[in-house]
Image (cartoon, rainbow, N blue to C red):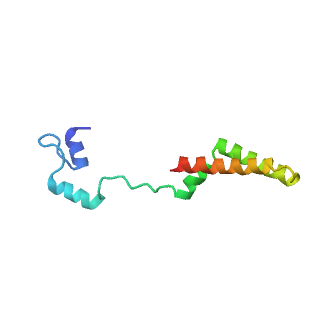
Amino acid sequence: MKIEELEKELETRISDQFGLTEASAAEKLQKFGMNALSERKGVPWFIRLLKEMTGPFSLLLWVGSLLCLIGFALDTSDLSNLYLGIVLGVVVIITGLFSYF
């Protein structure tokens, strides 16, 4: 493609001046709008917090907490399962909040 054809297609001049004229730039701005990226929507805060609470290690701790609570439900005389289940749940919540903030 020759330079003259390219200049005509792109509506600009390469040979004697560089870029667009002010009038041509204003016209293209009116026609096409600003040359900018659109703003990306962010992830809601509760989804980010949920992701922190459900990581692979966090899920492992949640399962351990649930198993401890089930063990306490089966044998209520042993309070250590209840305490361990509560502690594991609290640890997951605290570490998730620290990771979130």
Residue 69 in picture, x, y percent from top left: 79, 52
32 versus 10 height, above or below = below
Judge by depth and name the residue closer to the eye, 14 or 53: 53
Residue 22 in picture, x, y percent from top left: 15, 54
Q: In this view, does 11 lie to the left or right of 68?
A: left
Q: In this view, does 8 lie to the left or right of 78?
A: left
Q: Is residue 49 left or right of residue 74?
A: left
Q: Is residue 34 left or right of residue 94?
A: left
Q: Which residue occupies the extreme bottom position in the image? A: 30
Measuring 18% from the left and 45% from the top, which residue is drawn there?
19
Q: In which quarter of the image is the N terminus?
A: top left
Residue 6 in picture, x, y percent from top left: 24, 43
Q: Which residue occupies the extreme left position in the image? A: 16
Count of marks placed on residues: 0
Residue 14, quarter of the rendered image: top left
Residue 73 in picture, x, y percent from top left: 85, 54
Measuring 17% from the left and 45% from the top, which residue is drawn there?
13
Judge by depth and name the residue closer to the eye, 55 or 95: 95
